[in-house]
Structures are given as structure tokens and as C-alpha cells.
Amino acid sequence: MKIGNESNNRWYVLATLCIVLFIISIDNTVLNLALPSISTALNASASQLQWIVDTYTLIFASILITTGTLGDRYGRRKLLIIGLILFGIGSLGSSFSVSTLMLIIFRGVLGIAGALIMPSTLSILNHVFIERRERAKAFAIWSSIFSIGAGIGPIVGGLLINAFHWSSVFFLNVPIVVIGLVGTFLFVPESKDANTPSPDFPGVALSVIGLFALIGGTIQAGEFGWTAPRVLIEFGIALVFLFGFVMWEKYSPRPMLPLEFFKIRAFTGANVALTISAFAMMGSMFFFSQFLQSVRDYTPIIAAVGMFPMTISVFSFTMLSVRVFHRMGVKFTMSLGLLLMGAALFIFAATVGLQTSYWSILLVQLVLGSGIGLSMSPATNTIMSSLPPNRAGIGSAMNDTTRQLGGALGIAVLGALSNRVYRAEVGSLNTVSGMTESVLNMIRGSIQTAHNAVSALSGDVATFALNTAKQAFSDGMREALWVGGALMVVSALAAWFLLPNQEDKQHSGHDRVENLHLEEETSES
């Protein structure tokens, strides 16, 4: 089947790729909803919960650019099929996990699969939809489907957790994988660029080791302190390998990430804004479901329904963003969206606590959702449109890499800040009569393990200990939200000063890349 912009087949391609994308969006949000149940069932600490989330995200982000290059070189449809099969295997393995280590390993498998899937979807769309406005519409639909999956996922997950077991949220992926495979075989055409350079495997190795050391050190800092020897050693390893990665990319004849792309304002501005906003957004969202279930005592299904208004807000403003983007330009649209996201986090930080009303949570969701909807689709369109079509794989991979890497760092850093506050405050329970060291250690582990631990205490002591843990979690979450909101403001400023004024200016990136290559060839000759 051939790609042809004049054929209506491109809309079937879009529908199939949206189903494929749906798998990843559901998987992300279902996991957040299931964290309290996983922590209780597997006795996972707060640090282990961060690893369960971040292992997927880190592997995903670390190899995205390479998988984008592989897709450009050997076939995007081919990598999409491999990714779907691997995603099914990872989902089944996660479902049968009996320990946190086993779950973390299979989350890593899902990360590899996701990295094969995501850049393929955007690259194929970029290849199929050639006309600018039609492409912007396709990207908006792509983004909104991701948001819908993110919203429906928790509700379906809540029903599954209530009716069955936390592992059922991973079984959910399997039938969707099958549907995605059928649609891919029937409708999605193959596309590739045989002139794409071979993958940069040394660059991959340097970036993976450096990023894992950075995230590992940050997560451990929440438990042992920022100056602990083990933390400093990991940060040292991260510094060495990430510096080596930059140097390798600068002088390599076939870099994984051509640094020349960052000379394009639209490309750089959109990526910087996406990274910082994902840091704040995903780092903050990591706490939402835990707060509703473990502090406000919502059931999984009530928590899922309670978070659904944000999905409606995201979907509505994602579709609106196309009109705002074309009328006001990418700079205004993205900056406004990022400021709204910052305002939402500030509101939540000011109101979070044991007695937080749902109306406050609803307001936060509506404002946060509007900001996400306004900013994400224009950012994706800007990144993809700033590069020539034959570099679509790298553009797609960078769009996902910045989002995932920013999110992984956000969960690690904001999680570490929150965990330090939590552990410090619950440490005061060591003076409570009847408190044992073993029970206190369980309470220190996480807010979820605290619920189990207090059952070993007498009535009044148990109530006091649990309320102390809930307050400690709220205080830690508040600190993380203030930091997240401040970073959203920084992200908005970055978007305002780095992005071009009008929509058409971002497309000068095509010529900019060609000029950069021409300059290199001239200097070499």
C-alpha cells in the first residue's frame, strides 16, 4: 500500500495510529492509579514506586532517538509492529509480577516497546499528512487521543482494580495490542529513508548510563539525603557519562542527536518548553492519585471518576489550540498554556491538605487541563515542522524524548523532595507510646505502607500515626507543587523568548537545516 496525500487512506492510517497511541496513554495513567494497590500488594516503598514509574520512562527516553533513526532507515511500519508485539509481552510479564524487582524489569521491557512505537506513529503521520494545516489537525487529533486515553485509562483501571486485582490493569493492554496489529497490517504503509545514517550505539550507551545514574542518585537522595556518599557517587557517574555523551555527539560523524538542530530557534524553544513543562506536570501528577486514595481515602474508581474532568478539559482545549495556534502563533499559544498549568499547580499547593475539598481539586483539574491542551499540540507541531521530512524520525523522537525525560526527572526530583519531607515528619512518631521500630520503618516507607503498618497499633495510637503520615504526605506534596508551579513559569518564559512570533516562521527550520549542512560541506572542502 502506497502513501498518497490525495487518498482518503491517510485518515485510516491516522485512526490506526491513534489506536496504537491509545495503548501507551492508557498504560501511563492506569499505572498512576494502581500505585497505591501495587505498594500495598508488593510492600513497595516510595523509592520503589518511583523506580516502577521511572524505569519505563527512562528507557523510553534514552533510546527514542535511536529507534527513530532505526525507523527512518529500516522502515517505520516494521518497527511499529515489533514494538506492538514487545508491548504485549511486557504487559503480560507485568501482570504476573510477584515482586517489585520483577515488575520493574517488565516495565523496562514496556519502555523499549514504547520507544519503538511512539516515534513511528509521528513519523508516519508526518510523512502521510503533507499539507500544513491538515498536518496540524492530524497532530491535534493525535494529541487529543493521547489525552482521552489518559482520561479513560484511570476509570477503566479503577473498575478493574475494584473487581479483580492490580495486575488486571496490564492485561488491559493485550486486546488493544491485537487490534493495533491488525490495523497496522491492513492500513499503515511502509515508509523509510535509505539515506538515513546508521544508529549511534556509543551515544546510546553513554546517554543510558548517564541518565540512569542521574535518576538513581536523585531518587536515593529522597531517602538518604543529597550529600550521602552513594548519592554523590551516582551524580559523579552521571556527570562523566553525560558530558561524554555531549562530546561524542559533537564530534561523531553520525551523531544520535545532531547538535546543529539546536541552532533552530523553533526546535530549541519547543523542546526546552516541553522538557520543563513535562518535569513539572508529570512530577506533580505522580502524587495526584496517591493523594486522593491514601490521604482523602477515595476508592480507586471514585478517584478515577474524580480525575476525569481534567481529561475533558485537555481534549476540549487541544482541539481549540489549533484555532488559537493559527490565529495567534505558537509563542502566544504555548506561553498561555504553560502559565495556566503553573497557576493550577500554585492553586493546588495553596489548598492541599487533609481537608481539601473536591471543588478545589476540580478547579485545579480544569485549569491544568486547559493549559495542557493549549501547549502540547503546538509544541509537537513546531518540533516536527522545524525539521525537513527526511529527519522526521529524529523530530518525532525528540518530541517524545523531551516529554519523557522531563517527566522522569520530574518524578525523581519532586518525588525526592516530597519523600524527604514525608520521612522527616513521620520520624517524630518515634516518641509515641506503643510505637515499635519495625512499624515506624513501614510508615517511613510510603503513605501506602503506613496504612498497613498502623493495624499493628492500638486504636488511638493508630489513628494518630495514620493522620501524621497523611499530613506528612500532604506537606511533601505541597513543596513539590510549589516547585512544579515555579518551573511552569520558567517554561512559559522560555517559550516566549525562544519561539518565533508567527506560525510560518517555524517552517524556516527546513531551510535552516539545509543551510547548516551546506556550511559544513563548504568548510570541509
Image: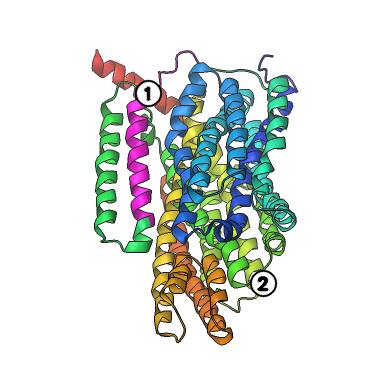
Image quarter in which the C terminus is found? top left
User: Which amino acid lies under the numbered mark 1 shown in the image of this protein?
Assistant: Asn
Residue located 45% across and 87% down the image: 433
Residue 488 is left or right of residue 24, and the answer is left
Q: Is residue 386 magenta?
A: no
For disc 1, the marked residue is 515
Question: Which region of the structure is painted magenta?
Answer: 193-219
For disc 2, the marked residue is 358
Residue located 48% across and 32% down the image: 395
User: x, y percentage for residue 219?
Assistant: 39, 56
Figure colour scheme: rainbow
User: x, y percentage for residue 304?
Assistant: 69, 59
Is 305 above or below relative to 518?
A: below
Q: Of the residues under marks 1 and 2, which one precedes in the sequence?
A: 2
Viewer-nearest residue: 191 or 471: 471
Residue 383 is left or right of residue 236, and the answer is right
User: Which amino acid lies under the numbered mark 2 shown in the image of this protein?
Assistant: Tyr
Residue 101 is left or right of residue 147, and the answer is left
User: x, y percentage for residue 498?
Assistant: 41, 46
**Crowd rating for badge 2 (residues with CA inside 10 Å; few <14, some 14–19, many 20+):** few
Q: Is residue 198 magenta?
A: yes
Q: Which element type, helix, strand or loop, lies under badge 2?
A: helix
- Disc 1 to disc 2, how far (Cα)? 54 Å
Residue located 60% across and 22% down the image: 77
Of labels 1 and 2, the one closer to you = 2
Magenta span: chief secondary structure: helix
Is 49 above or below relative to 11?
A: below
Is 118 above or below relative to 102?
A: above
